[in-house]
Image (spheres, helix red, strand yellow):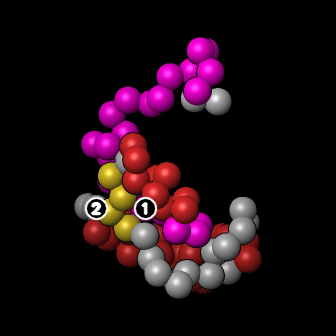
Amino acid sequence: MYETEKFGRPQGQDRVPTGVYAGPPAIRRLAERGNRIVHWPEGNPGRHHFAAMESPGPYAADMRTFFGAVR
């Protein structure tokens, strides 16, 4: 979508601390292009679109870790 003439890439995202819960290494490279990734846990159980529903306990713990670090 961002490559179309109707949409431009969001500006200023690199100023916002970002945490990512799931995704293969290729997604990380894409995410790091325009975001300031400060939290990307290794070995998390979230591998699909519904990570919070599949593994709510680990997901909640990871959210606490991320928000605890960016206070």
For image coordinates 45% across by 30% down, the residue present is 10
> Alpha-carbon distance for marks 1 and 2?
10 Å
Q: Where is residue 43 shown, x and y percent of the image? A: 53, 84
Horizontal and vertical percent position of residue 1? 64, 30
Residue 35 vertical placement versus 40 (above, below): above
Which residue is at a point 62% across and 82% down the rendered structure image?
Answer: 45
Mark closer to the observer (1, 2): 1
Label 1 crowding class (10 Å Cα cut-off): few <14, some 14-19, many 20+? Answer: some
Residue in the foreground of this view, choosing between 16 and 7: 7
Decide which of 25, 6 is in the foreground and name it. Answer: 25
Query: Where is residue 9 drawn, in percent x and y?
Result: 47, 29
31 relative position to 38: left or right: right
Q: Is residue 65 left or right of residue 71?
A: right
Which residues lie in the magenta part? 3-25
**Can you say whether 36 is above or below 55 in the image?**
above
Q: Report the number of discs.
A: 2
User: Is 47 a magenta residue?
Assistant: no
Mark closest to the chain's N terminus, 1 or 2? 1
User: Is residue 22 among what the camera can see?
Assistant: no
Q: Amino acid at mark 2?
A: Val
Q: Residue at x 32, y 43 (%)?
A: 14
Q: Quadrant of the C terminus?
A: bottom left
Task: Tell me the kind of residue under disc 1.
Answer: Gly
Using the image, tell me which numbered label, if any, was put on residue 19. 1
Relative to residue 63, is residue 50 drawn left or right?
right
Within-10-Å neighbours for mark 2: few <14, some 14–19, many 20+? few
Q: Is residue 71 visible?
A: yes
> Residue 20 lies in magenta, yes or no?
yes
43 over 23 or under it: above or below? below
- Name the residue beneath numbered marker 2: 70
Do the CB atoms of the residues marked 1 and 2 lie less than 8 Å apart?
yes
Secondary structure of the residue carrying numbered label 2? loop
